[in-house]
Image (cartoon, helix red, strand yellow):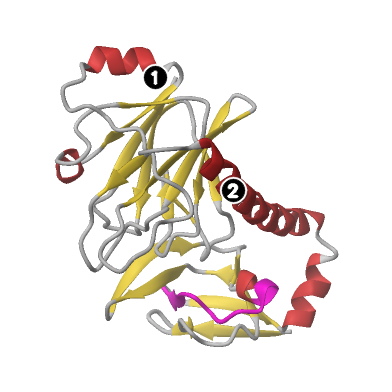
Amino acid sequence: MNRARFAEGQDLFKEGDPADSVFRLLSGAVDILRDLDGDPILLGTIGAGQFIGEMGVVENRPRNATARAASEVEVEILTPNEFFDQITGSPRVVRELIQRLSRRLREADDRIVNDERRSGEPRETSKDADSQTALELVKNAYLSAKNPWLRTQLHELVGLGDLPFVVGRGPVAREGLPPLQPDLKLDDTAPFRLSRNHFMIEKRDGNYYVRDLRSTLGTIVNGEPIGDHFRGDEAPLRAGENEVIAGGVNSPFVFSVSVA
């Protein structure tokens, strides 16, 4: 187990590198970036106390993002064996990893069930629907566009019921259909910020959660990045207004989710 320091702007590892170690961030902040047609896209920032690159080690696959020091940072570098030995002494970390992998298995099950449940076209929102009617359908929560750009596609409030609500992008030429049929399908142009299945809003035990559906660029919920590149795949929604950004920092796909 070694410690190392990285200057601001220095890469801890790059997208495509072998996942041969896990970093535990002791101080500073690290940006997570993904290459999008030659341009680096900032997906989010990780703070001190978190692991970086652990899922690549757990799943034995190459790095799928770049970790770059956003300030001077100090890290602890663990080999895969050292990482697994360390987490065996931390029930909390083990629980987080098990929950994350369990969610991925559940996600695969959800795709099968929802493919059977959903038939025909996804639910469409009527451009002429009255906002008051939409509020009556909301019951507990509703989704809307938070910026003028997105309002050109998402014109009104969309009520969220008890079933999972999937947000994604319509496929383009030579792309197949996504595993889940989106309830809200939006247009995007290359380089794509929005994945065909990007995120899902679901209700469990009376509470709403946003779950990233293994999107390319991840999702940010109230400032917390979630997805393959981060510690968790989901984040809870609080009462009142919540901000959900699909596609990394500065993405135009900025949503507001209001929960009663």
Q: Position of residue 57 (x, y in %)?
A: 66, 77
**Quadrant position of the N terminus in the picture:** bottom right
* Quadrant of residue 52 within the rendered picture: bottom right
* The magenta stretch spans residue 62: yes
Q: Residue placed at 37% from the left, 58% from the top? A: 195
Front position among marks 1 and 2 = 2
Using the image, tell me which numbered label, if any, was put on residue 207.
Answer: none
30 is higher (above) or lower (below) than 252: below
Task: Name the foreground residue: 109 vs 247.
Answer: 109
Mark 2 packing: few (<14 Cα in 10 Å), some, or many (20+)?
Answer: few
Q: Circle 2 sits on which residue?
A: 112
124 is higher (above) or lower (below) than 82: above
Task: Name the foreground residue: 45 vs 134.
Answer: 134
Amino acid, disc 2: Ile
Q: Residue placed at 42% from the left, 69% from the top? A: 31
Specify start and end residues of the magenta stretch as a single range.
57-70
Distance Cα–Cα, label 1 vs label 2:
26 Å
7 is higher (above) or lower (below) than 116: below
**Quadrant position of the C terminus in the picture:** top left
Q: Position of residue 242 (x, y in %)?
A: 39, 35
Q: Residue placed at 49% from the left, 75% from the top? A: 64
Disc on the earlier residue, 1 or 2:
2
* The magenta stretch spans residue 60: yes
Is label 1 in a helix, a strand or a loop?
helix
Residues at discs 1 and 2 in contact (Cβ within 8 Å) = no
191 is higher (above) or lower (below) than 170: below
Q: Position of residue 122 (x, y in %)?
A: 37, 38
On screen, residue 227 versus residue 231, left or right, reads left
Is label 2 in a helix, a strand or a loop?
helix
Q: Circle 1 sits on which residue?
A: 138
Q: Residue placed at 47% from the left, 49% from the top? A: 180
